[in-house]
Image (tube, rainbow, N blue to C red):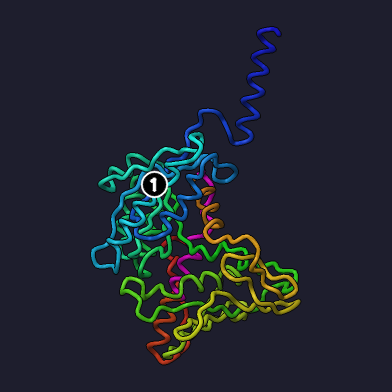
Amino acid sequence: MSRRSALWSILAIVTIAIGNGTAWGADPVRVGILGIDNFGSVAYTEFLNRPHAAGDFEGVRVVAAYPIGCDDYPDSAKLVEQWKKQLLEMYQKPKDPKDAVPPIEMVNSTEELLQKCDAVMIFSMDGRLHLPQATAVLKAGKRLFISRPLASSPEDAVAILKLSRETKTPCWSSSQHRFSAGFSGMRNHPEVGRVIGCDVYGGWIVNAPEADKFTRPLHSIETLYTIMGPGVVSVTCTSTPTAESITALWHDGRVGTYRGIKEGAVKYSATVFGDKGVSTAGIYGHGVPVNGVVPTNDKYVGYEGLAIEIARFFKGGPPPVSAAETLEIFSLLQAAEASKAQNGAVVRLKNLAADLGE
């Protein structure tokens, strides 16, 4: 083979490798975790650090974590130690040495974490910590995912996303329920057609910690938005010892509801009303119903859907949930609290995204 032919052969192999996303020697996107008392710190790392990762998870790896908790959040210190142990041991003793992955480094400050990573995931359970934590990350120009909730108040939520806009640093937050196939698959379900309305139900923790009280319905409200899309203009809210009930009116006249279950059996799902039919949704972690039957023996996909979106985002993709939609959800929660205080009066949503120019 001539020298020129050999060079062309090498170039072709490298081109194919790059096209397949497996360029030899390519450095992964280094991800740092800020706060680890949320189980998500372990759950998503299990996907991102999987040995021989392929597809969406290839080229992304958690390399460091700052194991900080919150002094006045219930069980935070205990959870920090529990998840720290799991993170340190993750994939470290494989049967086959070829399956080993580099260990995760525990650091002692946010500043040290930022020096070691290209992107950050915040997993502090206490949403009140998210604004100061996000401020440090965004000012450092690191792409940021914040585990549910984005913040513990509408004011902090606006401040975080405004800073993201000002620093031109992408940032987003989401519940894993948004990317559960049994929910996301209902928007274009052949047995339902165009979605006209939706009744969502899920748990409501009566004795939630102070930091969580405002965002208690977030899993289910994100499910409602996943199926219905944005566009809510007003809400009413009724609170009783057995249920928290929110009715939302969309700008096009569609109606969606949320039932927060305070007493009795708890399940996360929905009933969806469409122009072709009415169907129950799938349940969290499973697929969409077929002929009205909800699958439960299919592959359980709890955290994987959101993990895929996080990996795509860290590799340069756009935030899969817009700032405007996220702030609309916070506005809905704010209006629901106001309605409850006014004995179920109709309360219009504020445009929290106005400061973002949206």
Quarter residue 305 falls in: bottom right
Q: Residue furthest left?
A: 71
Q: In this view, does 97 lie to the left or right of 106?
A: right
Please state which of residues 163 and 314 is positioned toward the viewer in this rendering.
Answer: 314
Q: Residue at x 58, y 68 (%)?
A: 226
Q: Where is residue 192 in the image (x, y as percent from the top left)?
A: 72, 74
**Residue bounds of the magenta highlight:** 315-332
Q: Is residue 164 magenta?
A: no
Element carrying mark 1? helix
Q: Which residue is drawn at 52% across and 59% down?
A: 303
Quarter residue 254 falls in: bottom right
Q: Where is residue 139 in the image (x, y as percent from the top left)?
A: 33, 48
Relative height, residue 56 to residue 73 (above, below): above
Q: Where is residue 309 in the image (x, y as percent from the top left)?
A: 54, 53
Location of mark 1 (residue): 89
> How dense is the environment of label 1, judged by Cα within 10 Å: few (below 14), some, or many (20 and up)?
few
Q: Residue at x 62, y 77 (%)?
A: 252
Q: Is residue 322 magenta?
A: yes
Q: Residue at x 38, y 60 (%)?
A: 38
Instruction: Tell me the amino acid under the disc marked 1.
Output: Glu
Relative height, residue 80 to residue 199 (above, below): above
Give the mark count: 1
Please state which of residues 164 and 211 is positioned toward the viewer in this rendering.
Answer: 211
Q: Is residue 83 left or right of residue 227?
A: left
